[in-house]
Image (spheres, helix red, strand yellow):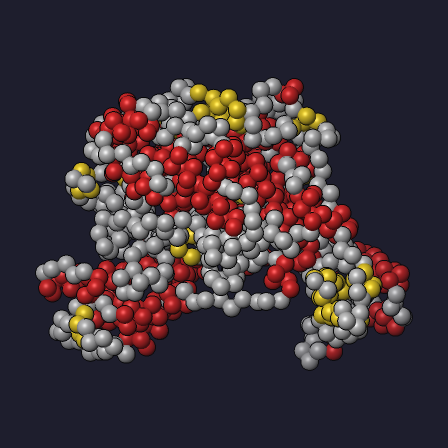
Amino acid sequence: MEMALVISASLVGLTLVLLSFPEHGSLNRVLDGTSGTVYLGSALVNEALHRATELTDAAYAHTRERVKKSWSESSLRSIDLLAQFKQIETSTRTQIQAAELLDNTVELIREMVYTNTMKQPNPYELLGEQDMENLLQVSGCATDVHTPTCQTDCLSERYRSITGECNNRQHPKWGAANIPYSRWLPPEYEDVWGMPRGWDPKHKYNNFSLPPVRLVSQEVLFTHNSNISEDSTLSHMLVDWGQWIDHDLVLTPQSPSTVTFKTGADCTHTCSRNTPCFPIQIPLSDPRNGVQSCMPFFRSAPSCSPGDLPHRHREQLNAITSYIDANMVYGSSAEQALALRNQSSPFGAMAVNLQHSDQDLPLMPFLPRLRAHLDPCGPRNSTTTGALDRSQLQENITSCFQAGDSRVNEHLGLIALHTVFLREHNRLVRELHHLNPHWSPDTLYQEARKIIGAMQQILTWEHYLPRVLGERVMSRLMPPYHGYHPGVDPSIANTFATAAFRFAHVTVQPVVTRLGPGYTYNSEYPPLPLHQSLFASWRVTQEGGIDPVLRGLLLSPAKLQTPGQMMVEELTERLFQAQGGMPLDLGALNLQRGRDHGIPGYSSWRRFCELSAPNTTSELAEILGNFTLAHKFQLLYGTPHNIDVWVGAISEPALPGGRVGPLLSCLLARQFRALRDGDRFWWERKGVFSKSQKEQLRTVSLSRIICDNSHITRVPVDPFSRTERPEDMLACSHPLIPHLDLSPWKEPDTDPSCGPIPRIQSGYSILCNSVIFYQCHSGFKLVGSSSISCDPKSQQWSSSPPACHDINECEELISPCPQNLECFNTASSFICSGQFSSFYKMFNAHDYSNLEHFILRSRVLWTLCCLHRLCSDSGDWGRGHGGDDSDLLPKVKH
């Protein structure tokens, strides 16, 4: 419904804009009014735009109906499930729909010109700049490429925006959500129109066609689950942390349509290549041959990048912020961030699960059940959990958790880390409230979010990257921090998202280890084959919570990547097998995604990093240190120049002390250095945190965070390093597992120049650079200035502080109560009553101006409401109330 409304709404603007286009009749060429250049497609814009709108609208409608039917019949395919859990926000969806309408229009114009002229036009003669400007307007793309206006007040310097916008004042969109990935090298598509590499299987690159990605996966990547070596120094927690941070940096949405725009064919049932379908062909030698002819694959959605109009090439969208800001906890849009918060919490806490807990520790909330009968994160073919499924169906919820990133349910390790940091946020806001009771819920939320973001940066740069790159490479490619550089673009590069930061897929173990107290085997939650842990969120609520998963990550080693042991068959042959239907192949998906994005080949990136580019098999063998592997590549690709960069980069032997080779070291270090130096809110930057706060943050450890937010009592000093035996774990009380001391976050009660900080009753305040900002409690209005500042010359506050006056809702022109009920004002609220009227009048006649009297009155009111069966377990008056007691319904504003 939402997709249809977006497209239909654009038709209104489309009609208006088309009125400005010239009448064309049978014209083949139209002059551009500004340059005098003749453009072949200008006269066809009107017709193509109408047709593209119809096709795009129909494709979205067909997709909605197919997915709705699959959900209702509990027959969701693996590819549908994967798409379902890469859900995007409304603003992202709107931009994608606009971009696809624009692309479909241009594609139709190109085909129409070819039909009229019988020759393929080039981009320089198809449309003029004014044509493209008009198309940007009518498609909706113009609104997505605007430059936001940035605030300059003190609080905008203190807290980063949720969308990432305005981090860079000169380039407000750098690093923000919903912008195209940056390019370090120009894309190399199959043609100038942005067709993927390998779209035509016969197309030649350096005189050779590209091999099917599934064949590369089978010949180079496939590793039997039993034929693996364990990493002697690194734990599996390091592997999962890599994916955790990846979800803080990268989210590439695919097209919302799962049918072809031109023909309406279902991409899950056709092996033809027709946008957005880019299926993975199954080779004749493949064990799957005869069972399936291809594996479904959808192109990444285009973005509304302005590019070099009208000759722009296809760019893909990053739907989340590029910065390490913990957006996987908090989201990347204002709407999402608000939905994740507990709106009634006086501490700025995140919402938690109301149906289940983890031995009294909170879990993330469940997602609502979008369709009847199917719980995509529930157990498959199980009769033992029927009662749970029925109860959750009645409550209209699923077993799927809700978090700042929609991929939270992908596997148990991600769920565990999401849960830990949700709890850590709620722990922090409680402690900060104790230190600063005058802070508002918003301030507490923002301060905790700021600390959580700093934790991600510290744990990644100080603990994770040195083990991935090696200390020597880290010091060479990642020099010490010297401050913020506004000329550095921190936006995620396409090759980083599509290739470089997918290196850890070859370090994943085929078994998910879960351990009981003492890090011992427990029959209640035994080890699982990896594919049975994917989208299996129900195991958290029914099989011991997150503690068994965390213990397994801490004690289990990572898989060691070697030339003969690349990617386990759990990922190449059984990906999402437990969810039913044909399983996918992660290696093939990675390779196909790189081709979809037009990522240049292996040799191009070697040259980019000033490394030698191999021309022959022997030169490649010298780089890889393995002739057998180099020979495989030669047989598959014909030349080293054609090797897909992801598989080429992961095949390089690791540099000393690290787990990646020279090419990946270059690409990873380049991106992470830009993320650090181009972030105005980087934790080490002067003014972001105080000196004493930074001293405390330097003590942050993942082991301490786990101790504080689980029932685990013994942890390793370094959770990313392999711990051989449970006896080597340290007690959480050990000095090497220090607590984060939050006392430096206590706001001073006096200003150095102007003396005591004026506080207000029934309100909040926050001190920001000698400016005090005020806000009233709900139900009160601010009278006076919302902020006062200290004048260092006069050493006086600029004015008296404001006051918070109770809002008398009963005096409003339209009564908040039903006509048959009388309204009685109370402090911060009001009561609608048809009973006890005389009591309320007498009660409100007394003076309850001081805090003691106010508390007394509140307790009496609460007692009355409970006697009248209005109080709920949650403490909210009248919540869920109905029936015969509706004549006494206390109304509150929360």
> Considering only vertical position in the picture, is 423 above or below 149?
above
Near-viewer residue (576 or 809): 576
Relative horizontal placement of residue 747, taking residue 297 as reference (left or right)? right
- What residue lies at 26% left-to-right and 53% top-to-bottom? 194
> Considering only vertical position in the picture, is 32 above or below 411?
below
- What residue lies at 48% left-to-right and 44% top-to-bottom? 672
Near-viewer residue (107 or 675): 675
Rendered location of residue 697, percent (x, y): 66, 43
Which residue extends farthest bottom? 813
Rendered location of residue 281, percent (x, y): 25, 37
Q: For residue 209, which quarter of the picture?
A: top left
Rendered location of residue 401, percent (x, y): 54, 44
- What residue lies at 20% left-to-right and 33% top-to-bottom? 638
- What residue lies at 34% left-to-right and 68% top-to-bottom? 136
Can residue 200 be spotted in the picture? yes
Relative horizontal placement of residue 216, taking residue 580 as reference (left or right)? left
Q: For residue 97, which quarter of the picture?
A: bottom left
> Considering only vertical position in the picture, is 622 above or below 693?
above
